[in-house]
Structure formats: structure tokens, C-alpha cells
Amino acid sequence: METPHSPWHAPWLWRAAQLLARLVVGALARLRVSGDVPDRLRAGPLILAANHISPFDPIVLAAACRARGVAPRIMATGGLFRAPVVGAAMRHAGHIRVDRGTAAVGRALHDAADAVAAGSVILVYPEGRIGLDPGMWPERGKTGTARLAFASGATVVPVAQWGSHEVLPYRAPKGLLGAVWRAVWRRPVIRVHFGAPVDLADVDPAAVGAARRATDRIIDAVTDALVPLRPDEPDRPRHVDPGRPADTSRLHRRRPARP
């Protein structure tokens, strides 16, 4: 379905921040970006659905998107918007506030749908949090991304990333300085892959359970895109963060095959 829209243009501040993100990632790690966003979708409307493995992810994805000529509006936790200076910059850049655990959380979906209708590229984390799967594979997703796709008619492109967990620990800013020093010394490889668009054409939004089926398909696509990024770590990650808890309550039903 085509979505009527008037193109949204990223403010210069956000494009400058993407350049800064590229410099920061380059100072701490070696970024490898593969796959691409189709030309017809690069300016939006588009939904990028990424796995979430580290507090460093937003910086990595900002840098990777710059490498592919995409300036996404990010759905980010409300705490960032309440922070001095950072909050004002987030609002000016057009990012979308998500107040998790509050009655206002539903407004984020409405705001994101409006943004997509305005021709934006939206970056979302379908898991809704930094994943706590013991193997660091994508968890069972929240249905917000699927409902956003249904409401807007926008294409969903899966984005898989691996390696950012070796730069910043789960409990950052605790342990931040030591982690940054180790990253500068070791320069771990961070890989980001833009996968093929997710086919949701056969999912009827009005059918019972449609949002869950579409969500599982999106998480499956992110999982498939992640497999080749960690070929020597098919079961558990080589780098273990002792501060990262494990939670098996949201294990995704699909387990990745060995490449």
C-alpha cells in the first residue's frame, strides 16, 4: 500500500550527530556495514527494525545508517528526553519519545505513525529493551513494530548488529571508563547488516493474532540477518559481560540454524 506523505528532511543537527557517531565508533571499534536499503525506501517512509544488545547500539546504528545514506528518527526511552541538553537535541532532531511503563506509552505508537506518514524513516527495537537472552539472540518481540507497520503501510527492513556489546557494558555508565579503555586498545569489530524487506503482505491486520504473527516474522528476519554476523558464536557469545542478567522468560520460539 502506498502511503501519501510530504517528505520529512532530517535537521542539520541530526546529520551532524550521525557524522559524530561515525567518528566515535571509529575511535572505539572497526565498523563493518553490509546489505543496503533499497533506493526507493531510503528517504522513507520506512521502518528499520533492529536487535538491541548494548547501550552503545544507538550510536552504532546512527553511524551505520549514515554509511547507507539514511537519517532515521529513533524511538528512544523517555529518560533521554528528560536529560538536560541531550533532551533538547533529541526533540530538535525529531526523535520519538517512548515512556515505558507509563500510561503515555501508547502515544509513542501514534507519534511514530504520524512520523511515517510524514515520510520519515523510523528506527525501532522490536524487543522493547536490551535483550537478555542467554545466547544474545533476539527475544520474543513486542507487537508495537507490527502495529506500526499495519497502521502506516510502511515497509519493514530488518537490521542485525553484533559487537557493540564488547564496547559498552550492560550496566553503563557503571564500568564505562574501563570498558572504553579496553575498546580503544582492542578495537573490536562491530558488524551491521541491512536485510531484505520483511514480507507481511499475506498477514491480514484485522485477523485475530495478526500483530503477533507479524512480530514473529519480523524477529525471525532479524535473527536470520544476525546469523552470518556471528558465525563462530552460534550458541553463546564469546565476550561475556558479568553485569548482564539472563532472562529466559521471553525466549523467541525460533532458534537460529548454524551457518
Image: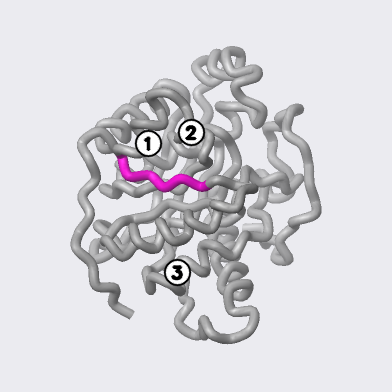
Query: Looking at this view, is 48 or 93 the one in front?
Result: 93
Label 2, label 3: how many angstroms apart (C-alpha)?
25 Å
Q: State yes or no: residue 189 in magenta.
A: no
Q: How is the image coloured?
A: one colour
Q: Which mark is residue 149?
A: 3
Please tell me whether mark 2 sits on a helix, a strand or a loop: helix
Location of residue 259 by image quarter = bottom right
- Number of disc labels: 3
Q: Quick check: 210 left or right of 139?
A: left
Apparent side of residue 192 relative to residue 91 in the rendered image (left or right): right
Q: Where residue 146 appears, x then y in whole percent?
A: 52, 68
Identified by mark 3, the residue type is Ala
Which label's residue is closer to the chain start, 2 or 1? 2
Instruction: Specify which label sits upstream in the sequence, 1 or 3.
Output: 1
Quadrant for the N terminus in the image:
bottom left
**Point 20% across, 36% down: residue:** 12
Bounds of the magenta span?
93-98
Residue holding disc 1: 90
Q: Are marks 2 and 1 in contact (CB under 8 Å)?
A: yes
Q: Secondary structure at mark 1?
A: helix
Q: CA distance from mark 2 to mark 1?
A: 8 Å
Q: Is residue 226 above or below residue 149?
A: above
For label 2, the residue is 80
Q: Secondary structure at mark 3?
A: helix
Give the spatial CA distance, label 1 vs label 3: 23 Å
State the image coordinates of residue 224 (x, y, percent, origin top left).
57, 61
